[in-house]
């Protein structure tokens, strides 16, 4: 399940490019030194992945709290159902959520203020811009955070989000060098694949929570195993 974050980042890179692409293209990369240019991009991506990792820890802790109440299976099923609902829910309905709208306004201002930091060329600038970029609102990041909650562990939540960030690097980096190398038709097909893949991940989380005894895919919960073991011990 953790590796699904990497695939989500890879497939959703076009969406991330639309949201964060302007920041990537505005980075004051060194045009005379290719090695320095690569290191500057690396620092930017490192800052972004660091932010994702911190978010993963926070949301993984939230998932752990739910796990402590014995809601492992219900949590996994609920997370999977939520992923599917978010994909099927019309965008107009999502915009009606005033709480998200207010946060959107705050982060939009933050994104506009990043332009001032982009005028500098010091290594800490790339780290700062990448780190702040990681906290900007993004529907795909929200989906990944939901998956981090389902991990039920801060360490696994951190790895989940960091793998998601790693998955977005190839396309975002290539686009910075090659510009619009993907045709409109290809971009459209990939965008249509993203919701489908999110629904597949949601279905996997639901299947995982059902505890059907399928190795790696839908293993039985520890509580079920403890109950069966206890029953076996009381047999005459």
Image: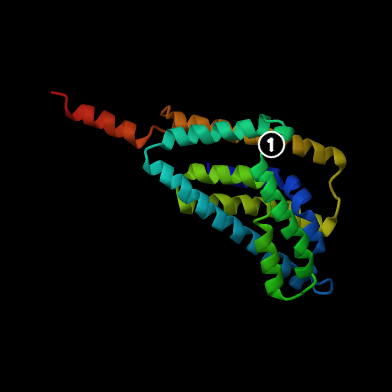
Residue 51, horizontal then vertical, whole percent:
60, 59
Residue at 45% over, 49% down:
153
| Front-most of residues 203 and 140 | 140
Element class at badge 1: helix
On the question of residue 217 being in view, the answer is no
Q: Is residue 41 visible?
A: yes
In this picture, residue 183 sits left or right of residue 1: right
Residue at 64 percent across and 34 percent down: it is: 86
27 lies left or right of 65: right
Q: Estimate the x, y position of residue 12 in percent, counting from the top left.
A: 70, 44
Q: In this view, does 52 lie above or below 68?
A: below
**Image quadrant containing the C terminus:** top left
View extreme (left): residue? 236
Residue 116 image position (x, y, % from top left): 78, 68
Q: Mark 1 points at which residue?
A: 94
Q: Quadrant of residue 46?
A: bottom right
| Residue projecting furthest to the bottom | 122
Residue 166: x and y, percent?
64, 54
Q: Residue at coordinates 71% horizontally, 68% vertically from top-left? A: 126
Q: Residue at x 70, y 74 (%)?
A: 123
Q: In the rendered image, which quarter is residue 147 located in?
A: top right
Question: Is 218 above or below relative to 64?
Answer: above
């Amino acid at each position: 399940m953790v590796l699904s974050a990497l695939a989500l980042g890879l497939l959703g890179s076009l969406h991330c490019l639309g949201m964060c692409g302007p920041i990537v293209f505005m980075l004051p990369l060194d045009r005379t030194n290719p090695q320095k240019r690569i290191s500057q991009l690396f620092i930017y991506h490192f800052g972004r992945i660091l932010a994702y990792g911190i978010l993963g820890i926070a949301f993984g802790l939230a998932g752990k709290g739910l796990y402590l109440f014995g809601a492992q299976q219900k949590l996994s099923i609920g997370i999977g159902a939520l992923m599917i609902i978010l994909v099927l829910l019309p965008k107009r309905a999502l915009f009606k959520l005033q709480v998200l709208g207010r946060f959107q306004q705050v982060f939009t201002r933050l994104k506009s203020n990043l332009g001032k930091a982009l005028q500098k060329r010091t290594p800490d600038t790339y780290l700062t811009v990448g780190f702040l970029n990681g906290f900007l609102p993004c529907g795909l990041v929200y989906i990944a955070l939901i998956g981090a909650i389902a991990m039920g562990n801060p360490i696994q939540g951190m790895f989940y989000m960091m793998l998601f960030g790693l998955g977005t690097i190839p396309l975002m980096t290539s686009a910075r060098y090659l510009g619009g190398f993907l045709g409109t038709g290809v971009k459209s097909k990939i965008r249509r694949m993203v919701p489908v893949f999110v629904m597949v991940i949601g279905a996997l989380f639901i299947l995982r929570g059902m505890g059907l005894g399928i190795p790696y895919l839908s293993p039985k919960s520890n509580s079920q195993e403890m109950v069966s073991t206890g029953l076996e011990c009381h047999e005459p």
